[in-house]
Image (cartoon, rainbow, N blue to C red):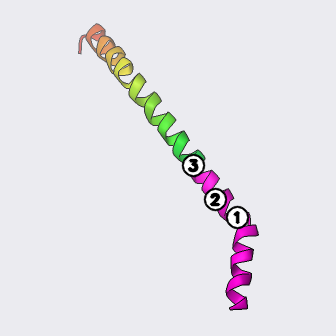
Amino acid sequence: MQNVINRAKAFITNEDGPTATEYAVMLALIIIAALTAITALGGRVSAIFSEVTTGIGG
């Protein structure tokens, strides 16, 4: 029983778990921001390539 209590205390005071969770949340936010930017710019880039293709005569 003392072993369980010691492990619980160690888990609460250990900072590796919260740090890993913070990195996971930051990574998720970066991915969401990247997908939003790609989606927003995707249509504009496609239109530019279409204009260039038309201008070249392709």
The residue under the point 66% across, 64% down is: 17
Image quarter for residue 49?
top left
Residue located beneath label 2 in the image: 20
The reply to whether callout 2 and callout 1 are in contact (CB within 8 Å) is yes
How far, Cα to Cα, is label 1 from label 3? 14 Å
User: Which three-letter amino acid code belongs to the residue tagged 3?
Assistant: Val
The residue under the point 52% across, 46% down is: 28
Residue 42: say if magenta.
no
Image quarter for residue 48?
top left
For label 3, the SS is helix
Residue 25 is left or right of residue 50, and the answer is right
The C terminus - image quarter: top left
Residue located beneath label 3 in the image: 25
How far, Cα to Cα, is label 2 from label 1? 6 Å
| Mark nearer the N terminus (1 vs 3) | 1
Q: Residues within 10 Å of mark 1 (few under 14, many from 20)?
A: few
Relative to 1, does residue 38 appear above or below in the rendering? Answer: above
Percent x, y of residue 5? 71, 83
Q: How crowded is mark 3: few (under 14 residues within 10 Å), some or many (20 or more)?
A: few
| Mark nearer the N terminus (3 vs 2) | 2
User: Which three-letter amino acid code belongs to the residue tagged 2?
Assistant: Ala
For label 2, the SS is helix
Which residue is the extreme one toward the bottom?
1
What's drawn in magenta, residue-wise? Answer: 1-24
User: Which three-letter amino acid code belongs to the residue tagged 1?
Assistant: Asp
